[in-house]
Image: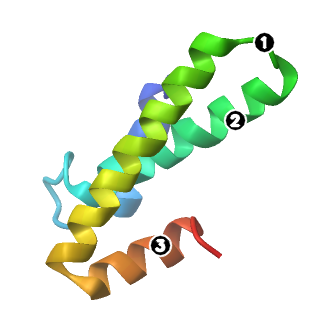
Amino acid sequence: MSLGTEEKQNLINTHQVHPTDTGSVEVQVAMLTTRISKLSTHLQGNIHDFSSRQGLLKMIGQRKRLLGYVRSKSEKRYTELIEKLAIRG
């Protein structure tokens, strides 16, 4: 499940750190979160799609590593990102 150009630009605009930011950790985590949620809804209807399930697990692992990086650099940025994306409850 890929993101459209308009959807990507919207995510970049809402999560960017500075005006020319397109690849910060916050933006990457936001994009991964959106892709994960789309793929999760796809897998609820297509239970036997094992290759998509494997891709989902890889994306979750990547997001976990990025969040760990943010947490190691700044606990405040990590907390703000988690709250903004409503990932952990």
Can you say whether 83 is above or below 86 in the image?
below
Does the rendering let one see residue 69? Answer: yes
User: CB under 8 Å between callouts 2 and 1?
Assistant: no
Q: Mark 1: which amino acid?
A: His
Residue visible at 50% across and 23% down? 55
Quarter of the figure with residue 46: top right
Instruction: Please tell me which residue is depicted at 51% across the width and 48% down the height of the picture.
Output: 33
Count of number-bearing discs: 3
Which disc number belongs to residue 33?
none
Is residue 88 shown left or right of residue 55?
Answer: right
Answer with mark 3 or mark 2, whichever residue precedes in sequence.
2
Which residue is at the front of the view, 80 or 57? 57
What amino acid does circle 2 point to?
Ser
* Label 3 SS: helix
**Closer to the eye: label 2 or 1:** 1
Q: Point out residue 12 in the picture as x, y percentages from the top left corner.
A: 34, 50
Q: Position of residue 34 (x, y in %)?
A: 54, 44
Front-most of residues 9 and 63: 63
Q: Which residue is mark 1?
A: 48
Q: Which residue is mark 2?
A: 40
Within 10 Å of disc 2 (Cα), the crowding (few <14, some 14-19, many 20+) is some
- Secondary structure beneath label 1: loop
Say which residue label 3 marks.
82
Amino acid beneath label 3 = Ile
Which residue is more in the foreground, 67 or 29?
67
- In the rendered view, tell whether residue 17 sits above or below residue 24: below
> Does residue 75 lie above or below 40 as drawn?
below
Q: Quick check: 28 left or right of 87?
A: left
Percent coordinates x, y for residue 88 in the rendering: 58, 70
